[in-house]
Image: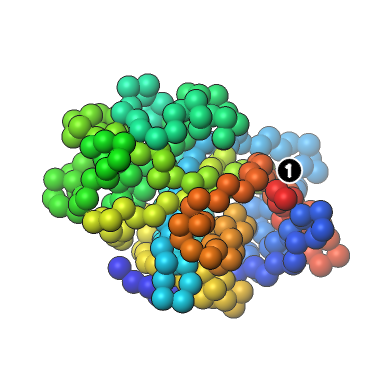
Amino acid sequence: MTDRVTGEATGEATRDVTPEGVREFPISDAPALRERADAWLEASAADAREPVAPKAAATVMFVRDGPSAVEVFMLRRVATMAFAPRMMVFPGGGVDARDADPSLPWAGPTPAEWAERLQVEEATARELVAAAVREVFEESGVLLAGPSADEVVADVSGEHWQEQRRRLLQREASLSEVLRAHDLVLRSDLLGYRAHWITPEFEARRYDTRFFSAAVPAGQRVDDQTTEADLAGWVRPADLLAAWRAGQALMLPPTVVCVEEVAAAQSAAAFIAERPHVAPVQPELVQTPDGLTLRARLPR
């Protein structure tokens, strides 16, 4: 585990948000991203482009009160990852079909209540919340579940729980099966809901991602045992944003915006309890006088 945040490629600068909520992220200094964007534009000119359907995904911002500011837990994806290599990200990942299991033990706001909040069907809400809980357990060792609606399992760092993480990761068991085997219920009340971003159309791998927030339950701790990251730790948002602006850390637009929101938080509890207006955001390629840009219209 480390608190150090560095990167080897160039981070992109960004313009201020306009009164209309438009944010621009120039990509001229991101060669790999620019290459994919150029290929998409060439295909578009030839009338041969066909965007890939985005896969549903969920990610969680773990936050805590630090000595001088609210801190957030981040991972840096390994360079060999097919999607977002070497990017600083929050733990999370794609939805698995078994996340929609209706027998999943559940406490807190119901799937129907989450469906209203997420603006999706009930089955989709169930799988998105389940995916968030499953993915953060797989990637960071935090299990948002307990023996009852008022309790959280205290310690999941031992060998037995590491085996449960492996079984989930290898798809040998579903989250529902693991929780039922241990007489636990998913604690959906421990999650806040922050954002909804969709990968731009020019990317070959696309995700329709819901961003949640949570605190690490007492007695548990985040770790760096995932093979998908080569760096993990708690960071001060201001430090990470400074590293990104200096080209020492890489982040995609959704991560930048979310980290900025953590930087503005008065406390971890307040951040999780907030109910910001959430609407889907899908950045679009726009050619500007200053070069090719990803333009996003943020909810206001």
Assign the N terminus to one quadrant of the image.
bottom left
Residue at 41 percent across and 76 percent down: it is 67
Residue 291 visible from this viewpoint: yes
> The disc labelled 1 sits on which kind of residue?
Ala
Specify whether 295 is left or right of 11. right
Which one is in front, 115 or 202? 115
Residue at 36 percent across and 27 percent down: it is 98
10 Å crowding of disc 1: few (<14), some (14-19), many (20+):
some
In the rendered image of this protein, does residue 94 appear above or below residue 295? above
Q: In this view, which residue lies farthest toward the right?
A: 289
Residue 34, position as x, y percentages in the image: 67, 59
The residue that mark 1 highlights is 43
Q: In terms of image quadrants, where is residue 106?
A: top left
Marks counted in the figure total 1
Residue 131 visible from this viewpoint: no
Residue 23, position as x, y percentages in the image: 74, 58
Residue 217, position as x, y percentages in the image: 31, 53
User: Quick one: SS at disc 1?
Assistant: helix
Specify whether 228 is left or right of 294. left
Residue at 57 percent across and 76 percent down: it is 242
In the rendered image of this protein, does residue 286 appear above or below residue 174? below
Specify whether 149 is left or right of 289. left
In the rendered image of this protein, does residue 149 appear above or below residue 18? above
Which one is in front, 114 or 296? 114
Which one is in front, 138 or 83? 138
Residue 199, position as x, y percentages in the image: 61, 45
Q: How is the image coloured?
A: rainbow
